[in-house]
Image (cartoon, rainbow, N blue to C red):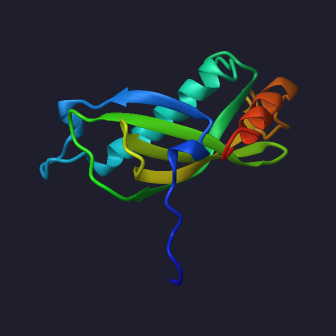
Amino acid sequence: MTGKRHEPRREEYGFIVEIPTRWSDNDMFGHINNVQYYRFFEVVVVRFLAERAKIDIMTAPVIPYAAESLCRFRRQASFPDVIEGALKVEHLGNSSVRWGLALFRRGDADAVADGHWVHVFVDRESGRPLPIPGPLRETFEALRSTPGG
């Protein structure tokens, strides 16, 4: 591989939430277990969808299905760190969105992990892809137009 991989910076992300770690998030090596990073990504995405996009995942007629995810582990974190989960829109398609995600220790400029998550929006009943509804698209576009989004 040539060149250095981009280091995510907090200012690139338009939505940030705090995620307290728990003792049980640590593994036998004393740092956050790799599985937890995906759970932290999920917290960020679900909070964004609930708080900013105002989608009720339990009842909405059009819902997001995860189609792809990636996590790059960069630095250690461990309990009792507070994680700041960050989200931006990297790509907005007809029926899909690619979220750019990063996790930072509270106050740190350098990410402990970063990656992406692709959601495809589908009809709840049929499971078939549908265009992202207008109000959701507008919310995603607004995030895309913020720094880094």
Horizontally, residue 13 falls left or right of residue 43, namely right
Left or right: residue 89 versus residue 39 is: right
Q: Is residue 57 visible?
A: no
Most foreground residue, 4 or 122: 4
Q: How many marks?
A: 0
**Measuring 22% from the left and 42% from the top, which residue is drawn there?**
78
The image shows residue 8, relative to residue 83, as above or below, that is below
Image coordinates for residue 136, horizontal then vertical, percent: 78, 28
Compared to residue 6, the image places residue 19 above or below, namely: above
- The quadrant in which the C terminus is found is top right
Q: Residue at x 77, y 40 (%)?
A: 145
Which residue occupies the extreme bottom position in the image? Answer: 2
Q: Position of residue 7 (x, y in %)?
A: 49, 60
Image coordinates of residue 54 in percent, x first then y, are 68, 17
The picture quadrant where one finds residue 51 is top right
Residue 6 appears in view? yes
Residue 65 point in image, percent of width and height:
64, 39
Q: Toward which corner of the image does residue 75 lie, by quadrant?
A: bottom left
Q: Looking at the rendering, which quadrant does residue 62 occupy?
A: top right
Answer left or right for 44 relative to 22: right
Question: Foreground: 77 or 49?
Answer: 77
Q: Residue at x 81, y 35 (%)?
A: 132
Residue at 85% x, 45% y is 94
Compared with residue 58, is residue 94 higher up or lower down, i.e. above or below? below
